[in-house]
Image (cartoon, helix red, strand yellow):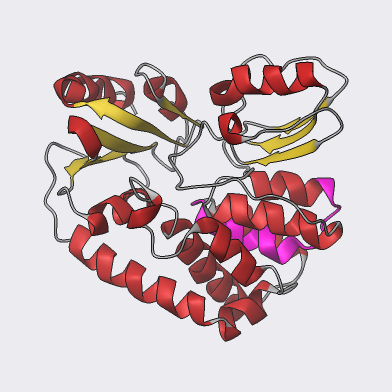
Amino acid sequence: MFNGDADGLCALHQLRLAAPAESRLVTGPKREIALLERVDAAAGDRVTVLDVSLDRNRAALERLLVRGVSVEWFDHHYAGAIPSHPLLEAHIDTAPETCTSAIVDLHLGGRFRAWAVAAAYGDGLARTADALAGSINLDAGARATLRSLGEDLNYNAYGDSEADLCVPPAALYRELAPYPDPLRFAAGAAVVAKLRACRIADLSKALAVTPYRADVYLLPAEAWARRASGTFANDLAAREPDRAHAVLVPCSEGHYGVSIRAPRAAPTGCAALAREFPTGGGREAAAGIDRLPADALQRFIERFQAAFRAR
């Protein structure tokens, strides 16, 4: 079970390169967090969870553990209290400069570190990615390729539903699974060119949008905007590292999907802000709200401005 973004994909790929296994894939768009409810497992089964909040899946996890299902969990999002259970193996680190692929990389002793580099770039963690890249002597050209690949993979996960995505995450994982080396995947897989072309076209539209309020952007109710929202938020954070940003896009039933980015210079505060609203969650540097009611828009803007005003 994995988040369909760059971090989830690359985390799973590292594990499967280290220990190949036939398994059922449970995934979806980036904002589809409550995935564990879809897992029908029985005593003796093993579930591996990657890049998905334990707190958002707590009830489903407890049900599986009671059934006798073994669960291995790798994540960097807010988890709350981690259950103490002999069938649960949790590798959770919520530090703002880490990601799930970096946690898996540490667990595997750096055996497939280039994939963690791509994931960290895709997750907007350039300093983490640069440090990992330096440890395996990747040159500037290789780093640029992995940055672009990570951003392409991450971009593909944004959307209100799988129908918005360029490639379904499970299908994308199967495309990259044969490649031990992400540089070869970036150079030789047609799906990478497809993702890149889609990302470039969508982001050019997003960059033409004027702010709705200071540091708050409201995109139109279109598929390209639902795809571009998170990557656009990362782009804004990189362009103005001393400022926080919020990007909202209308989704189904009169709600907004929200992406929140803290200032790169002080990467904290996003998780607490997001959790003030139902369906909100994430990590300190970057968080989101899956379904913000339209009548809560003004309250969110006020809370966003209050949370980051003193920065």
| Residue 201 versus residue 215 in the image, above or below | below
Magenta range: 107-124
Q: Residue at x 31, y 23 (%)?
A: 310
| Nearest the eye: 251 or 270 | 251
Please tell me in which quadrant of the rendered image residue 176 appears: bottom right
On the image, which quarter does residue 186 sit in?
Answer: bottom right
Residue at 27% x, 25% y is 304
Q: Position of residue 229 (x, y in %)?
A: 30, 50
Measuring 78% from the left and 20% from the top, which residue is drawn there? 67
Going by the image, does 5 lie left or right of 94? left
Residue 111 seen by the camera: no
- Does the segment drawn in magenta span residue 108? yes
- Please say whether residue 119 is one of the residues in the magenta stretch: yes
Assign the N terminus to one quadrant of the image. top right
Q: Can residue 286 be seen?
A: yes
Magenta stretch, overall SS:
helix
x and y, in percent, of residue 252 in the image: 23, 37
Q: Give the residue drawn at x 55%, y 35%.
A: 35
